[in-house]
Amino acid sequence: MLKEVAFYKSDLEKQEAKLAEMKAQGADEYDIKKFAENVVADCRSVLPDSETRLEKALDDLSESFGLISSKTVVDDECVKKASKLLGAQGRKVSLEAESMQKKGTDISELAEGEAF
């Protein structure tokens, strides 16, 4: 999805540059209008959906890290790549096995017979 969003952004920039070039060269107003309505508008319309789907996928991936508790899983190459990808997108993920261990409920301060 990262590549998809990057492609759409790049394509939009190219089409906007082409539109500016058409205007600078004094192209026919009808051609400029049609190009803007069809090509540039189409590029602009697909980008928000792609960005939304990317954000959702990154959120889902981030949530998945909360389920990791095994050192074996933490050492997995795919998990490391996913962590790196999230880090590159500005999302913090800790791959320390100790920080991912599930903690039990502390019952040391409960009085005898007290429910928790």
Image: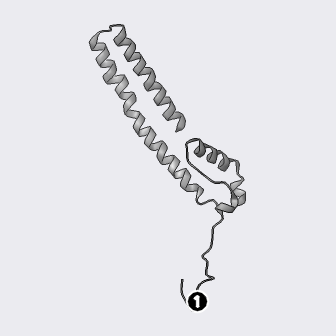
Query: Which percent across, then down, holds residue 35?
Result: 34, 19
> What residue is drawn where x is 58% and y is 85%?
110
Q: Quadrant of residue 52?
A: top left
- Which residue is the site of mark 1? 111
Q: Establish if 110 lies above or below 17.
A: below
> What residue is drawn where x is 60% and y is 45%?
87
Q: Is residue 68 left or right of residue 1?
A: right
Query: Which percent across, then down, holds residue 85?
Result: 60, 43
Q: Is residue 60 visible?
A: yes
Report the number of numbered marks: 1
Q: Nearer the viewer, residue 29 or 105?
A: 105
Q: Is residue 4 left or right of residue 84?
A: left
Q: Is residue 30 left or right of residue 39?
A: left
> What residue is drawn where x is 34% and y is 27%?
41
Q: Establish if 77 lies above or below 9.
A: below
Q: Quadrant of residue 49?
A: top left
Q: Is residue 69 visible?
A: no
Query: Which percent across, then down, holds residue 107?
Result: 61, 81
Residue ranking furthest to the front: 109
Residue ranking furthest to the left: 30
Residue ranking furthest to the bottom: 113
Q: In the structure shown, which secondary structural element does the residue marked by tag 1 occupy?
A: loop
Q: Quadrant of residue 70?
A: bottom right
Query: Which percent across, then down, holds residue 25?
Result: 36, 7
Color scheme of the displayed model? one colour
Q: Establish if 84 lies above or below 75.
A: above
> What residue is drawn where x is 30% and y is 18%?
34
Q: Amino acid at mark 1?
A: Ala
Q: Where's the C terminus, which quadrant?
A: bottom right
Q: Is residue 42 left or right of residue 11?
A: left
Crowding near the residue tagged with mark 1, few <14, some 14–19, many ≥20 C-alpha atoms within 10 Å: few
